Every structure is written in C-alpha cells, then in structure tokens.
Image: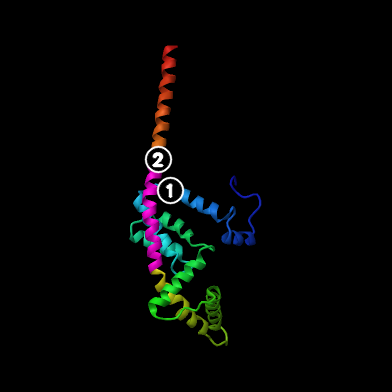
C-alpha cells in the first residue's frame, strides 16, 4: 500500500500518542483548527457543532463523547464532523481542571461537600473494577460487591453530571460566539483567494490565446 507506515506503530506507542500526540498537543490543536475552518458548511452550523463538542467534554461519559457530541449536533442542526473534532477540547491536559470545576459546581448545586483531596482518577478506576469483578461474579461463586461503584455514583458521577451543565454551556457558548466570526472571515478570505487565482488563470489563458492568434 502506498500510504502504509514502513514501521507499524506498536500498541505502546499508540497508547502513548493518545496521551501525548506526535508533535505535541499544540500541533494537534492547530491541525483540528485547520480542519474545522475548511469544513464545507456555513459558519453557524460549524459553530453549533463546536458548541456540541465542547459542551460534551464537561460530561462524565468518557468513552461516549463522540456519540453524545454527534447527537447534540444533530438535534441543534450543527455540523457533526465539527462536533467530533471539538471534543478534542477535552484531553489529558484539560480533563483535570474540567473535572474539578464540574465536581465543585455539582456539589455546590446539590448542597453536598466536595472533597479537596479526592482522587478522581482512582474513583473512576475503582468503579471500573467493580463493574469488571461483578460481571465475572455472575459466572463464579464470588459475591458481588458494589460499594465502590455506589460511592463513585454519589460522590463523583452524579455531581459531575449535574455540575458539568453550567460550565459546559458557558464554555460551549463562548466557543460558538468566537467561532462564527472567525470561520466567516476565514471562508470569505479563502473565497477571495480562490477568485483571485481563477481571475489570474483566466488572464493567463487569454494572453496565451492572444499570442497564438498573433502567430
């Protein structure tokens, strides 16, 4: 195959690039921005897709952000591809502040206390272990134990889900209102460049035609 890698990417390298892309997150962000601006759609639809993607990163449904963002974009008549690319707003560099903001907001709204020393990653891992262990317990004599998952839901998941709505709407709204004029200006500038190239092409063609006629 023409575009196949000479050296196949190992699983370790693939996993490492999920945490830190080749070239860094700055380069990845520039690539996403470039692709979003060149989408063949109106600035409003693209920006609604960006809103959907950014808002989704404030939800605790890790692993399902693509599907949720696409669903919100469809409902709001936004660009679905833009919504998928905008989920990169959530990445290993931003998930911690997003999680802390969402949890603090959620506990405040619910009137519960947020533990400052809470290890969010450990709570997610504990809930995952409960799901795995209890799944296998259905086929063995082991006893199901849901205490970690129950605590995770009460202290992390539900407050996260409730608290992520307000900051998600704020971040998504800011992204929308910033994106519309920027994308419109980029599209207009690009159209101007294409028109100028086409006009230059026609001019050169006319000159060649005149030279041939002169001969």
Q: Nearer the viewer, residue 191 or 214?
A: 191
Secondary structure category for the residue under label 1: helix
In three-dimensional space, the C-alpha distance between marks 2 and 1, rounded to whole angstroms, equals 11 Å
* Disc assigned to residue 37: 1
Residue at image coords 39%, 52%: 179
Write down the residue under mark 2: 189
Q: Is residue 1 left or right of residue 67?
A: right
Q: Nearer the viewer, residue 168 or 135?
A: 168
**Position in image of residue 46 (x %, y %):** 38, 52
- The answer to whether marks 2 and 1 mark residues whose Cβ atoms lie closer than 8 Å is no
Secondary structure category for the residue under label 2: helix
**Position in image of residue 8 (x %, y %):** 64, 54
Find the magenta span and give its range.
166-188
Task: Pick out the residue farthest to the top.
Answer: 215
Locate residue 202: give its quadrant.
top left
Residue at image coords 55%, 88%: 143
């Amino acid at each position: 195959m023409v575009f196949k890698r000479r050296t196949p990417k190992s699983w370790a390298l693939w996993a490492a690039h999920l945490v830190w892309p080749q070239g860094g997150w700055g380069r990845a962000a520039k690539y996403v921005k470039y692709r979003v601006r060149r989408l063949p759609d109106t600035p409003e639809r693209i920006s609604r897709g960006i809103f959907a993607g950014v808002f989704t990163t404030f939800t605790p449904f890790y692993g399902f952000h693509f599907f949720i963002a696409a669903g919100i974009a469809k409902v709001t008549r936004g660009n679905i591809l833009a919504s998928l690319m905008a989920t990169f707003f959530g990445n290993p560099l931003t998930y911690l502040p997003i999680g802390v903001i969402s949890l603090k907001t959620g506990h405040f709204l619910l009137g519960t206390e947020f533990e400052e020393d809470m290890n969010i990653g450990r709570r997610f891992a504990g809930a995952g272990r409960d799901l795995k262990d209890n799944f296998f317990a259905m086929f063995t004599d082991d006893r199901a134990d849901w205490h970690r998952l129950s605590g995770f839901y009460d202290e992390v998941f539900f407050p996260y889900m409730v608290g992520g709505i307000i900051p998600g709407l704020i971040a998504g709204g800011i992204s929308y209102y910033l994106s519309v004029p920027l994308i419109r200006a980029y599209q207009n500038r690009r159209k101007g460049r294409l028109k100028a190239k086409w006009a230059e092409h026609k001019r050169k063609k006319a000159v060649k035609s005149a030279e041939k006629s002169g001969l």
